[in-house]
Image (cartoon, rainbow, N blue to C red):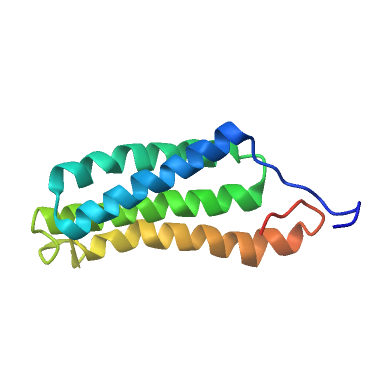
Amino acid sequence: MNNSDNVYSIPVRFRKMENLHIVFWLFKDISWCMVWRPLGIAMIFPTLIISIIIAWRTRNLVSELTHNLAITFWISANSLWMISEFFHFDEKILFWGLSGKHSAMIPFCIGVSMLLYYYAWWKPRHKDEMDTM
């Protein structure tokens, strides 16, 4: 690494929270796989809250913010899909012709749209900005 390279560092207390976030996320998904409804639903809250906190803390770097918000929408979509399976409305048509499971496409698409915005519009117009991606 030469002296002109930008350095992006994460404080240890933030990194510990990010690592704990992964633990919650894994417990949520394991609970989904094993159909452990109470634990799966309980794990939505810390997983989602920490992803929002991480996004908030990275709000000054557009590259980090957009990716962290996409993760937040991914967790939201994933949680909606899990709940639809837990309570057996995954195949039931709810609105706009979408089933419970397919309604998760709404937050999935919001997350993808954020990344499309970043890569197609923002990043090409801000080449001098620090980019962590």
Q: Nearer the viewer, residue 30 or 133?
A: 30
Image point (63%, 64%), residue name = 119
In the image, 86: left or right of 25? left
Spot occupied by residue 130 in the image (x, y as percentages of width and height): 76, 51
Image point (21%, 55%), residue name = 32
Spot occupied by residue 109 in the image (x, y as percentages of width and height): 40, 62
Res 51 seen here: no
Q: How many marks?
A: 0
Residue 124 higher or lower than 87, as above or below: below
In the image, 86: left or right of 44? left
In the image, 65: left or right of 89? right
Spot occupied by residue 28 in the image (x, y as percentages of width and height): 28, 49
Furthest residue toward top = 13
**Quadrant (top left, top right, bottom left, bottom right) of the N terminus:** bottom right
Image point (28%, 42%), residue name = 43
Residue 125 higher or lower than 22, as above or below: below
Residue 47 higher or lower than 82, as above or below: above
Spot occupied by residue 87 in the image (x, y as percentages of width and height): 9, 53
**Quadrant (top left, top right, bottom left, bottom right) of the C terminus:** bottom right
Furthest residue toward right = 3
In the image, 29: left or right of 49? left
Res 103 seen here: yes
Image point (35%, 44%), residue name = 24
